[in-house]
Image: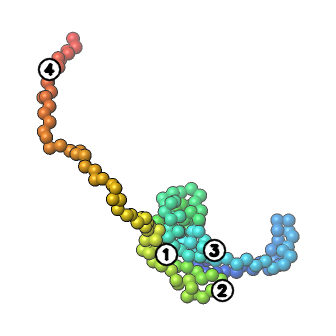
Amino acid sequence: MQGGQPLNDGDYRLILRGGSVTDAVGNPLPADYTFDFFVLAGDANHDRSVDFNDLVKLAQNYNTTGSKTYAQGDFTGDGKVDFNDLVILAQRYNTSLPAPGATAATAALTSSFAADWATATSFAPPPTTPNPQKKKVKPIRVFSVTPVTRPMPVRRKTPVHRLS
């Protein structure tokens, strides 16, 4: 966080200068340490894009609380997966960061939610060929239009018991 605010989406490089950081015993860092990382809000699986896979993680944990993680869809860091997290994902849905060193045009090549959904739910059944040996089966009647007569139930008078 930068001044209490989350970092903007993008690639970052952290450099710890040698001698400026010490360990728990007071030993200084002997040389510079460099760490490259990226931030993309809503990217639960950390693959540099916000897509259907991230939506699935959020949906699996939606309306749950108790030490939820970023990978489980808690994009606000409050320990629960709720509407606020869904808003973050929806604002960035179908966006991605280019791989380090790639151009921004590469990252823009994404499909729509509808196309992702169609791909995820498509099922092509195997082709069927008619079987000439198969006999036609006569349907079994489940309902009947013949009235059924039932005897009328006999009502008996129930005796009244009085307490004396």
Which numbered disc flags the more N-terminal residue, 3 or 2?
3
Q: Residues within 10 Å of mark 3 (few under 14, many from 20)?
A: few
Residue type at mark 2: give it: Gly
Which numbered disc flags the more N-terminal residue, 3 or 4?
3
Q: Residues within 10 Å of mark 4 (few under 14, many from 20)?
A: few
| Circles 1 and 3: CB atoms closer than 8 Å | no
**What is the x, y in percent for residue 107?**
56, 83
For disc 2, the marked residue is 101
Picture layout, residue 117 above or below residue 104: above
For disc 4, the marked residue is 157
Residue type at mark 3: give it: Met
| Circles 3 and 2: CB atoms closer than 8 Å | no
Q: Residues within 10 Å of mark 2 (few under 14, many from 20)?
A: few
Query: Disc 1 versus disc 3: distance between alpha carbons?
Result: 22 Å
Picture layout, residue 96 above or below residue 146: below
Residue type at mark 1: give it: Tyr
**What is the x, y in percent for residue 106?**
57, 85
For disc 3, the marked residue is 1
| Circles 1 and 4: CB atoms closer than 8 Å | no
Instruction: Residue 133: name its quadrant.
Output: bottom left
Which residue is at a point 61% across and 81% down the rendered structure image? 10
| Circles 2 and 4: CB atoms closer than 8 Å | no
**What is the x, y in percent for residue 73?**
54, 65
The colour scheme of the drawn protein is: rainbow
Query: Disc 1 versus disc 4: distance between alpha carbons?
Result: 73 Å
